[in-house]
Amino acid sequence: MTDVMASQTVDRIAATPARAHVVYDLLRNGATWPQWSQATRTQLGDQQAPE
């Protein structure tokens, strides 16, 4: 059996007192997502640095 994950794009806007580099570090590290989102597992695609 092949384990296939559906592709999902998430687009959200929110305000936070956190510094930008802290937010981007969390977003880049998919292992942290289950701690602060509804994601139970992740597989990140293109991991380019933010512009």
Image (cartoon, grey):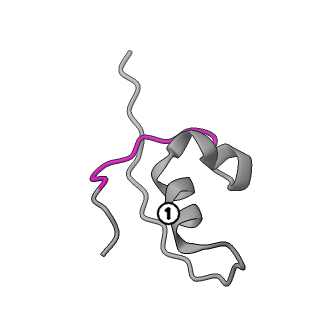
Q: How many numbered dots are placed on residues in this image?
A: 1
Residue located at (42% from left, 64% from top) = 9
**Magenta highlight on residue 46:** yes
Badge 1 density bin: few <14, some 14–19, many ≥20, Cα 10 Å: few
On screen, residue 47 above or below 4: below
On screen, residue 49 above or below 35: below
Quadrant of the snapshot with the N terminus: top left
Q: Is residue 3 left or right of residue 17?
A: left
Res. 15 image quadrant: bottom right
Residue located at (31% from left, 62% from top) = 49
37 and 47: which is toward the camera: 47
Q: What percent of the width, then of the height, locates residue 23?
A: 57, 65
Res. 34 image quadrant: top right
**Magenta highlight on residue 21:** no
State which region is magenta: 40-47
Quadrant of the snapshot with the C terminus: bottom left
**Residue sitting at the far top:** 1
Our reading of the magenta stretch's main secondary structure is loop
44 and 20: which is toward the camera: 20
Q: Dot 1: what SS?
A: helix
Q: What percent of the width, then of the height, locates residue 40?
A: 63, 41
Residue located at (42% from left, 39% from top) = 5
On screen, residue 7 above or below 24: above
Residue under pointer 1? 24
Q: What percent of the width, then of the height, locates residue 3?
A: 41, 25
Q: What percent of the width, then of the height, locates residue 30?
A: 51, 44
Under mark 1, the amino acid is Tyr
